[in-house]
Amino acid sequence: MIRVLVADDQAAARTGLRLLLDGEPDIEVVGEAADGHDVVALTERRRPDVVFTDLRMPRMDGLTAIRRVCSLRAAPAVIALTTFDTDEYLFGALQAGAVGFVLKDSEPGLFVDAVRAAFQGQGLIDPQVTRRLVHRFAETSPRPATAELDELTPRELDVLRSLARGRSNAEIAEELFISAGTVKIHIARVLAKLGVATRVQAVIYAHRHGLVTWD
């Protein structure tokens, strides 16, 4: 079972998300938080695998809560949830350590997919904002190669390029004729060598340094 903590200052939103996620056979909502302070406290107490949190909450805003949750020992994967898709919220959430970003008006299936992807170590960003996100981070001229890139093996570079094109672990495995387990190992090494915390940050890195283009 994927243990999920949901957080929103509106009770109706929490209830709706709980009903949606609890209806899946492999997902269990283990707690609800109404503000950022409770997000951190309940995460420490309930030890969820995934935290689904709104960005605008009282007492402690969602971005601060995400940073604190992601700094915890054995931190869960965090998905940001909001009605706003402004640059401030998008970039703030991802830079704080969120692995996914979903708008509240998204299709119900996307919420479930985001939880499963986060649990598997794969970030999922709402398709409504994905293209804009990558363009925003890569809008300047590609940066020159860095010492971190020089540390990557040819196979790790292939995996990073596939990752930056939006491929899942299974798709990368099929594309490169390696196992899904090997893909996970390569991705972990890529993140460590690049000094980034999430797959999304690795994708941004790849676009910023001109490893792939976004048509």
Image (cartoon, rainbow, N blue to C red):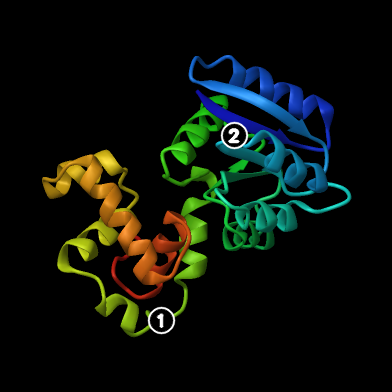
- Percent x, y for residue 4? 61, 31
Three-letter residue code for mark 1 = Ser
Residue to which mark 1 is pinned: 141
Vertical arrangement, residue 207 with respect to residue 3, above or below: below
Seen as rendered, the residue at the extreme right is 59
- Whether residue 91 sits left or right of residue 110 in the image: it is right
Task: Answer with left or right where residue 106 lies relative to residue 151.
Answer: right
Q: Residue at x 43, y 70 (%)?
A: 195
Expressed as whole percent of the image width and height from the top left, the position of residue 179 reads 17, 41
Left or right? Give the position of 17 relative to 130: right
Name the foreground residue: 72 vs 188. 72
* Residue 82 image position (x, y, % from top left): 69, 44
Q: Is residue 100 above or below residue 13?
A: below
Mark pair 2, 1: CA separation: 32 Å
Q: Which mark is residue 106?
A: 2
Please tell me how crowded label 2 is: few (under 14), some (14-19), or many (20+) other residues with Cα within 10 Å.
few
